[in-house]
Amino acid sequence: MKYWIETWGCQMNQLDSARLSGNLAGAGMEPAAALEEASLFLLNTCSVREKAEAKVFARLGELKAWKHRRPGRRIALCGCIAQQYGEALLKRAPLLDFVFGPGEVDRIARHIALGVAVATHLPDAVDYDPAVVDRSDEVISMVTIMEGCSQGCSFCIVPRVRGRARSRPAGSIEREVRLLLDDGRDDILLLGQVVNAYRDPVSGLGLTGLLERLAGLPGVRNLAFVTSHPALFDPRLPAVMRDHPVLSRYFHMPIQSGSDRILRAMRRGHSREQYLEAAGRLGDTVPGLALSSDFIVGYPGETEADFEETLDLIRRVRFASLYAFAYSPRPGTSAARIADDVPAVEKNRRLNELLRMHDAIQREENGRLAGAVMDAHVVAPGREPGAWVARTRCNRVVHFAAADPAAVRPGAWVRLKITEGLPHSLRADPV
Ligand code: SF4
């Protein structure tokens, strides 16, 4: 049987899809080269974005003709939406054959063989067999170190759909990283909803200790980790990043708002000042660090003054990149019970103003990199013949034309001289 996986959402979902693929392939199934060849369609969903549920039903509507074109075709809904709504989805969408939560990725083939239609158990422990991860399409190798979240931000559905924070044993993480390195994969991305909540269940080792341990492994070229929470910031981390050059120069630490009043309402567990202090320490200690963050504008009760504080924080930190969204309530979160009182038109105005302001900052920051020489990991061909797209070790996208096309392929490392800073990327020449 051939299968086709469509993935929405974050890097955790991408890794889950690679594990789904590995699990199905291990049971003798084959990835289809095109959707039309497949008899099993897996939709790995995300519930973070607005109207995620509506998007699922719209996609299922599109798949109706596909399913009925050939008898025996089946559709499985996986991921966070599956976890959130469970069995109810089968009733609402008779086109669906299976509903599997993110805790079931390693049991999918078995469930399908046994005809288990709904499975949404979230295991207490986090671990998996590295051999069942399909890494055929991967340039940067993702490794789960923890799952779930115990922070309980008012707007977020993650603790409900991914469970409380659970960490994977450090020994198991190290074994997987060693296997990747032996396989020539030297760009590793450690994943978790809140990586700095990491605690080795065996030794109690925290994230900083884990990074030191993994950064010392022979062959590692870039070791990145996302996402970090400001309330759990470890003051030892900046020095560890400085002293271990293989640790990525990219640090993603969402704040969501620059206003203390809104941070309290969001139950973020930290203040604006704490964030600024952590960002300052990182910037002062780690040369070339690119700091990135997430923002929500128009959270219930957000005034113009609160929004101004957010803009002020962005001006002060000068983030290398950021992700910003207009607030919309997610069913099942505590914030969904509060009146969504900032009008949509005002949310959009604030969002556009924030993005416009940050675009100018980003253009200036990228422009300052002109003349710098950096290593970058080639991720994909560019649009023009001979053009390539790579990622720097500070996670910036860089476009370049290969001097020797035969020497460049996805997965290769190149040394580049930055020639121009664009608003969202860099242009470079090979050195
Ligand atoms: S820390 Fe992040 S994942 Fe956890 S509840 Fe808050 S926003 Fe969601």
Image: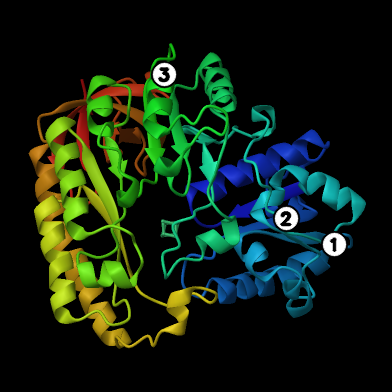
Q: Quadrant of the C terminus?
A: top left
Q: Say what secondary structure mark 1 lies in.
A: loop
Q: Is residue 72 above or below residue 238?
A: below
Please provide percent x and percent y for residue 86.
Answer: 71, 68
Q: Is residue 35 above or below residue 204?
A: below
Where is mark 2, residue-wise? 121
The coloring applied to the image is rainbow
Q: Is residue 60 above or below residue 364?
A: below
Q: Say what secondary structure mark 3 lies in.
A: loop
Q: Say what secondary structure mark 2 lies in.
A: loop
Q: Nearer the viewer, residue 146 or 137?
A: 146
Where is mark 3, residue-wise? 220
- Is residue 329 at least partly visible in the picture? no
Q: Where ligand 1 lies, by image quadrant? A: bottom left
Residue 214 location, quadrant: top left
Where is mark 1, residue-wise? 70
Please provide percent x and percent y for residue 93.
Answer: 74, 76
Q: CA distance from mark 2 to mark 1?
A: 31 Å
Q: Dot 1 surroundings within 10 Å: few (below 14), some, or many (20 or more)?
A: few
Amino acid at dot 1:
Arg
Amino acid at dot 2:
His
Label 1 or label 3, whichever comes before in sequence order: 1
Q: Residue at x 62, y 69 (%)?
A: 59
